[in-house]
């Protein structure tokens, strides 16, 4: 069996509010339980230099390197795989995740350096792959793979039945740079179930995890949440595709959180037709402060065409129920859906505004035809024209897929206006801060964003490392560190740098290390131990 595996999370921007890569942690958990030594390289919160890959390969000497990707980060991941193969041709290169799962032919054609794709949920498939020490390989017997054979792409059967979540080892978060995410104040995600019985035509998540919803044992979910709270995380995102799919499961988790007296804020995804005031109230009592709905459109015919199976009335009722239960309601709308016209766009925006007046926080995405979705696989059937096959364009903030007769500049203008409105809002607060008219909450929001930006800038540019060692006698406080890193952060005022470092210290994000010349240096806290909660 291959016994050293490197897993890589490719870079994507902090504007996406990253959380520690849960899929890789699950894979690492399954591999470690089988005795494999795993290392995770997380390039979302750690810098990548031209030597990063060569250095890691040299230090860790893996037999297998695996990378994850969504569509927008696919090209970045491909470049990493190319690097790995160029440096060490004998290493088996693997990719998984929602993009490559449904883009097997195109990926294997574009990336000859990639040996094999793991499709769908990866834990058991990757283990089977590592166990296959046979020569010649017997990959054709392993469900869930795609690879080249005899000059063409061979795809084995989809892995079914799906993984029993009760038997799955816990995610190995100890292998992630959790300390960096905690220092940045990023949320951490957990899942309580996998699967979604609905069939929205733009969604690939559901195809990854299947229609039958499988549940994790609630006590183990709450152990995990308790452990994350003990590590100092303040915000947990329940990343299930549809947390409220089963009211009993949802209530059991809430009851267990309440029984243990855990004080942690969390949020979850829901559908407008799977909530009730009683459920939302219980969720709020258990610490859930926000639920996110996909309302998608303000036009009933479009909702029908995208098989969302919700009505505008249900959306209105769900927002009212959230208000009654004291829960923040968030919603995402997708612009450029099949059948979209200038008129339906107006309807959607008017509907969003109307619900906004009743307390809904909402945002807009532009339709991206992800591989594996009904829309991505057959855009013609939906009257859509795909404008870009450059995967880096698939961030859902620009029009890359057009309904018949729609002008892309109209869609882009709405998305831009929406982003500009947010920037204007921040500018306005900053102006009012200068004139002393901003509220405490508003000022805190700006300070918090600035501190996060500085700390992230420092992490990605190795500012701590570049600031060099110091003599611990008499120096070593945050003021001293701020003074030494300030020349490396010329765009930030000294006071803001000091605040950011103080915050990092309070979040236990900095540690002192001894250097070889007997001096001291500050480093980021990377891995955190798994706390034992029971
Ligand atoms: C939580 C979540 C987020 C979180 C955290 C994302 C993260 N990277 O951890 C946040 C809010 C940051 C986020 C952001 C975005 N997300 Co998101 N997100 C999700 C969600 C709901 C759950 C992901 C999750 O944690 N699943 C649980 C873990 C255990 O599963 P997993 O990560 O898929 O990993 C398993 C398998 O994929 C596989 N696997 C994965 N990687 C690898 C690697 C190897 C080597 C192997 C062998 C196997 C393997 O094995 C893992 C274990 O079974 C999914 C929906 C879904 N069901 O996938 C959407 C989803 C992944 N997101 C999506 C999108 C589009 C985005 C954004 C682009 C947002 C946007 N602008 O629209 C950004 C991109 C950020 C990024 N680069 O990841 C799409 C991706 C579609 C696509 N093809 O690109 C999904 C599928 C939802 C959808 N629209 O259908 N997201
Ligand atoms: S959008 Fe939500 S409800 Fe629709 S298929 Fe995807 S996960 Fe399920």
Image (spheres, rainbow, N blue to C red):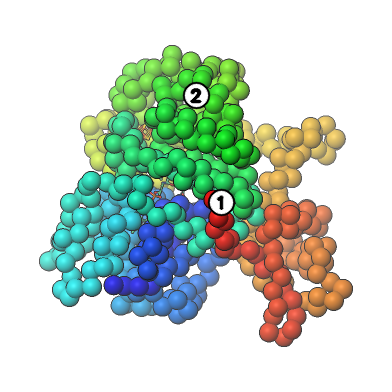
User: Residue at 59% of width from left, 63% of height from top?
Assistant: 526
Look at the image and tell me whether residue 458 can be seen: yes
Q: Counting residues from the N terminus, which is met first, the one under dot 2 or under dot 1? A: 2
Residue farthest left in this picture? 150
Q: Looking at the image, which is closer to me, 495 or 502?
A: 502
Give the residue at mark 1.
533
Look at the image and tell me whether residue 468 can be seen: no
User: Residue at 37% of width from left, 68% of height from top?
Assistant: 35
On the picture, is 326 further left or further right than 254?
right
Rendered image quadrant of residue 323: top right
Element type where label 1 sits in the image: loop
Q: CA distance from mark 2 to mark 1?
A: 27 Å
Q: Looking at the image, which is closer to me, 433 or 94?
A: 94
Task: Classify 156 as above or below 282.
Answer: below
User: Residue at 58% of width from left, 17% of height from top?
Assistant: 324
Residue farthest top in this picture? 313
- In the image, the residue with mark 2 has its CB under 8 Å from the nearest atom of ligand 2: no
On the picture, is 470 further left or further right than 239?
right
Residue 463's label in the rendered image is none
- In the image, the residue with mark 1 has its CB under 8 Å from the nearest atom of ligand 1: no
Rendered image quadrant of residue 360: top right
User: Residue at 45% of width from left, 54% of height from top?
Assistant: 171
Where is residue 500? Give x, y as percent: 74, 54
Element type where label 2 sits in the image: helix
CB of mark 2 within 8 Å of CB of mark 1? no
Where is residue 487? Give x, y as percent: 76, 66
Task: Classify 293 as above or below 60.
Answer: above
On the picture, is 501 further left or further right than 103?
right
Where is residue 502? Give x, y as percent: 77, 56
Give the residue at mark 2.
279
Residue farthest front in this picture? 534
């Amino acid at each position: 069996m291959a016994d050293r595996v490197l897993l890589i999370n490719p870079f994507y921007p902090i504007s996406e509010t990253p959380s520690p890569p849960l899929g890789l942690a699950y894979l690492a958990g399954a591999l470690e339980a089988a005795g494999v030594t795993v290392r995770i390289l997380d390039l979302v919160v750690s810098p990548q230099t031209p030597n990063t890959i060569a250095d890691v390969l040299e230090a860790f000497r893996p037999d297998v390197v695996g990378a994850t990707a969504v569509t927008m980060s696919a090209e970045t991941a491909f470049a990493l795989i190319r690097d790995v193969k160029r440096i060490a041709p004998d290493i088996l290169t693997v990719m998984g995740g929602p993009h490559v799962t449904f883009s097997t032919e195109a990926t294997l054609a574009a990336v000859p350096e990639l040996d094999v794709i793991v499709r769908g949920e990866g834990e058991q498939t990757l283990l089977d792959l590592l166990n296959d020490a046979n020569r010649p390989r017997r990959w054709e017997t392993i469900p869930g793979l795609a690879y080249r054979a005899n000059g063409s792409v061979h795809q084995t059967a989809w892995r079914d039945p799906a993984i029993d979540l009760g038997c799955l080892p816990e995610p190995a978060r100890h292998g992630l740079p959790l300390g960096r995410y905690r220092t940045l104040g990023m949320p951490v995600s957990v899942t309580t179930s996998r699967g979604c019985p609905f069939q929205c035509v733009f969604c690939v998540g559901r195809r990854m995890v299947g229609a039958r919803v499988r549940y994790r044992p609630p006590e183990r979910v709450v152990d995990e949440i308790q452990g994350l709270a003990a590590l100092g995380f303040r915000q947990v995102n329940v990343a299930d595709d549809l947390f409220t799919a089963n009211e009993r499961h949802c209530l059991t988790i809430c009851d267990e959180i309440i029984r243990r007296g855990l004080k942690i804020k969390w949020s979850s995804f829901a559908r407008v037709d799977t909530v009730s005031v009683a459920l939302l109230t219980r969720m709020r009592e258990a610490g859930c402060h926000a639920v996110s709905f996909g309302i998608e459109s303000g036009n009933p015919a479009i909702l029908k065409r995208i098989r969302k199976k919700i009505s505008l009335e249900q959306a209105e009722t769900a927002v009212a129920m959230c208000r009654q239960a004291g829960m923040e309601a968030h919603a995402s709308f997708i612009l450029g859906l099949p059948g979209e016209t200038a008129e339906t766009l107006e309807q959607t925006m008017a509907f969003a505004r109307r619900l906004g007046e009743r307390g809904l926080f909402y945002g807009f995405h532009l339709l991206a035809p992800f591989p594996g979705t009904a829309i991505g696989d057959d855009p013609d059937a939906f009257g859509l024209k795909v404008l870009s096959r450059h995967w880096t364009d698939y961030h859902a903030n620009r029009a890359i897929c057009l309904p018949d007769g729609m002008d892309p500049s109209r869609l882009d203008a709405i998305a831009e206006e929406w982003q500009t409105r947010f920037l204007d809002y921040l500018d306005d607060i900053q102006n009012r801060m200068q004139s002393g008219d901003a509220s405490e909450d508003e000022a805190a929001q700006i300070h918090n964003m600035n501190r996060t930006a500085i700390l992230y800038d420092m992490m990605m540019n190795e500012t701590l490392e570049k600031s060099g060692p110091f003599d611990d006698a008499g120096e070593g406080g945050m003021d001293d560190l701020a003074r030494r890193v300030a020349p490396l952060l010329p765009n930030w005022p000294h006071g803001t740098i000091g605040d950011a470092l103080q915050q990092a210290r309070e979040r236990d994000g900095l540690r002192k290390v001894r250097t070889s010349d007997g001096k001291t240096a500050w480093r980021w806290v990377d891995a955190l131990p798994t706390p034992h909660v029971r």
